[in-house]
Amino acid sequence: MPPTRVVYGIGDSLIGKDHWASQPLFHLRAMAGDSVRFKAQGISGDRTAHVAARLDRDVIEQSPKPDVCIVLAGTNDIAWDAPATLITGNLEVIYRKLLDARIQPVAVSIYPFGGPRWWTPALELTRQQVRTWMHRWLPVELPEVEVVDVDDVIADLTDPQRPRIRAEYVDAEGIHLNSAGAAAVASALWTRARALRGIQG
C-alpha cells in the first residue's frame, strides 16, 4: 500500500538524513509506520538562505507532494554571526513559500549550542531572539505555522546563561544529537505538532 501522508524535513545537518538514527525523522518513521513516507533534505553547513534557495527543488516540486515539512535551520547562520533579523527573514520566506504551496510548515527551534568552544553570549542572544520571534511573531503574523520548541526537552540549564544539549543527548562535538537525543526530539514533534499527531501508523 502506498503511503497516505508524506513528511519532509529541510535544513542543515541537524535535520540530516532520514536513515540515520541520530536524526529525528528516523524515529518519526518508526512512530508513524508504513503509511507515512519520511524524507530528510538536510545539508551540512547550510544556512537559512541556502535552505530557502533550494526549497522548491528539494521539497515543493517533489512527487508525491509533501503534506508536511519540518524546518530546522539557523545554527550555521549564528555560527557565522548573522543577525537574528536575517535568520528570521529567511525563515519567514521558507514558511510562506510552503504555505503558498499548501504544505504545512512545522518550525523547530534552534537547538541550544553552549557546548562548543565557539559559543559566546552574543551568539546565544541571537538564538534567543529567534526563539522569541517564533513564539511571539509567528502566532500573530503566520498562525498557520506550527512551532515546536524543544529547549525544554534537550537543554541542560545547569548554567542558565549558557544552555547546551544534555549530556545524554549529545554527540562528542557538543552540537549534534545522538540517537537518544534524536528520539527525544522526534517524540516532542510527534506529540506537539498537530500535523503529525493526526498521522496513524
Image (cartoon, rainbow, N blue to C red):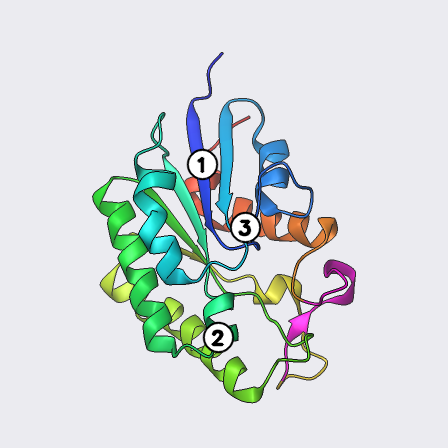
Q: What secondary structure is found at the residue carrying circle 1?
A: strand
The residues tagged by marks 3 and 2 sit, at their Cα atoms, a distance apart of 19 Å
Residue 15 visible in the current orientation: yes
**Disc with the residue nearer the chain's start (1 vs 2):** 1
- The magenta segment is 162-174
78 horizontally vs 25: left or right: left
163 in the magenta segment: yes
Please, what is the three-letter code of the amino acid marked with disc 3?
Answer: Ile
Q: Which one is earlier in the sequence, the residue at label 3 or at label 2? A: 3
At 69% from the left and 74% from the top, the residue drawn is: 115
Instruction: Calculate the distance from the C-alpha at mark 1 to the C-alpha at mark 2.
Output: 29 Å
Does residue 143 appear in this view? no
Would residue 174 be found to the left or right of residue 4 on screen? right
Closest to the observer, 128 or 74: 74
Q: Nearer the viewer, mark 3 or mark 2?
A: 2
Which residue is under mark 2? 80
Q: Is residue 7 above or below residue 140?
A: above
Identify the residue position indicated by label 1 in the image.
Answer: 7
The answer to whether residue 76 is above or below residue 83 is above
Disc sitting over residue 198 in the figure: none
